[in-house]
Amino acid sequence: MKKCIRILGALALATCNGLVFAQSNVTFYGVMDMGISHDRGGIAGNSTRATSGMATQSRWGFKGREELGGGMSAFFVVEGGIHADTGVPTQNGTLFGRTSIVGLGTRYGAVSIGLQDTPLFTTLNTIVDPLRNGIARSNNLMSSTGFRAGNSVLYRTPTIDGFSADAMYVAGEVAGDQGAARQLGGSVGYSKGAVNVRLAYHNKNNDTATVKNTASARNTLLGANYDFGPAKLYFGYGIDQGLNSAPLNSGAVNFAGPAPTASADSTDLLLGVSAPFGVSTVVATYIRKNDRTALNQDARQYALAYMVAFSKRTDIYTSYALIRNHNGAGYTEGNSEEPGIGDRQFTVGLRHRF
């Protein structure tokens, strides 16, 4: 009798464990991207390297959601970047330096708190840049003050007849000065059928605990794409104003001549096209940085990429891109994982999503 009871108890426990597991909604996911990059044009000479995350930064993470009833759900995401060539974490060695949030979703929208992409960066990646800031990334010339923000609160509206909006507040957390280092941002857009249009804005207060009364950095970005079947067209126009509104993508001086200076007054233009051919896709982009300061350090980037998909999760890619710097500008040709060391870069790589 006792043996039967023990067997029935074991079966009940196994059944309960199975139910708990079935109700769990936690996903482990990631990307591993490795290849070879060859940089030319830098003052230190050419360089060929095994490079991680050129088309998509290598990463891993967990995400989950729990239905709470009444149309409400709780969710979380933790995601960290990996230098796949060395195994070292990206984002200054942080474990989950790409995303670390918890939030609540309702029929009226969703609120998330933590480290997350700004609305401006999301617009650049998902609406404007067909290469999603990977190989020949738009960040090379369209760098802004508002890419990813910790200590942030983000609200997203539901999509209603194609329209949606979001708003972000980032606490500066400077004792005695609520405005110092504070950031505000948001976007509004329309997406339906073949058309996607979005307008985004980000403002960052440059004051610190010791430096006061500085001008804020302000970025405005209008983006659009249109899929007409044989190809998809992309457009982006940005306005960057104020200190730190357009930081250089590389902190090193990579070219001969005067030291490059980050612009505090510039405009950006991106034109792109993506054309699928069976399992292959060809992407071309043109980006112009127009420096409106007295230095007039303009730059232009030309890029061509080719991808071949083995499956929905695995593909190979190659690209060539070059930057034409003017009047001592120092923009370098980088990819998703690194800023590069020259004004030309050739890549070939393998990307696997899991």
Image (spheres, helix red, strand yellow):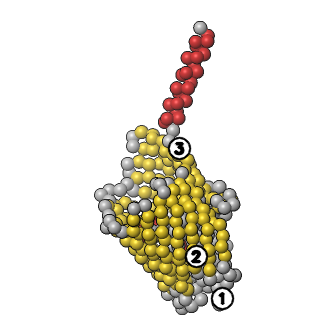
The residue carrying mark 3 is 26
Quadrant including the N terminus: top right
N-term-proximal mark, 1 vs 2: 1
Q: Is residue 300 visible?
A: yes
Question: 10 Å neighbourhood of mark 1: few (<14), some, or many (≥20)?
Answer: few
Where, by quadrant of the figure, is residue 270 drawn? Answer: bottom left
Callout 3 environment at 10 Å: few (<14), some (14 to 19), or many (20+)?
Answer: some
Compared with residue 206, is residue 93 higher up or lower down, i.e. above or below? above
SS class of the residue under badge 1? loop
Marks 3 and 2, the one that precedes in the sequence: 3
Question: Label 3 is placed on what type of residue?
Answer: Val
Q: Are marks 3 and 2 in contact (CB under 8 Å)?
A: no
> Who's the residue at 40% across and 52% down the image?
109
Mark 1 near mark 2, Cβ–Cβ under 8 Å?
no
Q: Residue at x 55, y 59 (%)?
A: 351
Indicate which label's residue lies in the foreground, 1 or 2.
2
Which of these two is toward me, 329 or 333? 333
Closer to us: mark 3 or mark 2?
2
Q: Which mark is residue 210?
A: none
Circle 2 is placed at which residue position?
Answer: 345
| Amino acid type for the residue under numbered disc 2 | Gln
Residue at point 49%, 36% (across, down): 23
Residue type marked 1: Ala
Whole-percent x, y for residue 258 in the image: 65, 89
Residue 87 location (% of width, % of height): 68, 58
Task: Return the residue nearer the eye: 33 or 162.
Answer: 33
Residue 122, given in percent of the width and then of the height, sits at: 47, 64
Q: Mark 1 and mark 2: span between their CA atoms?
A: 18 Å
| Residue that label 1 marks | 256
Marks 3 and 2, how far apart at CA: 39 Å
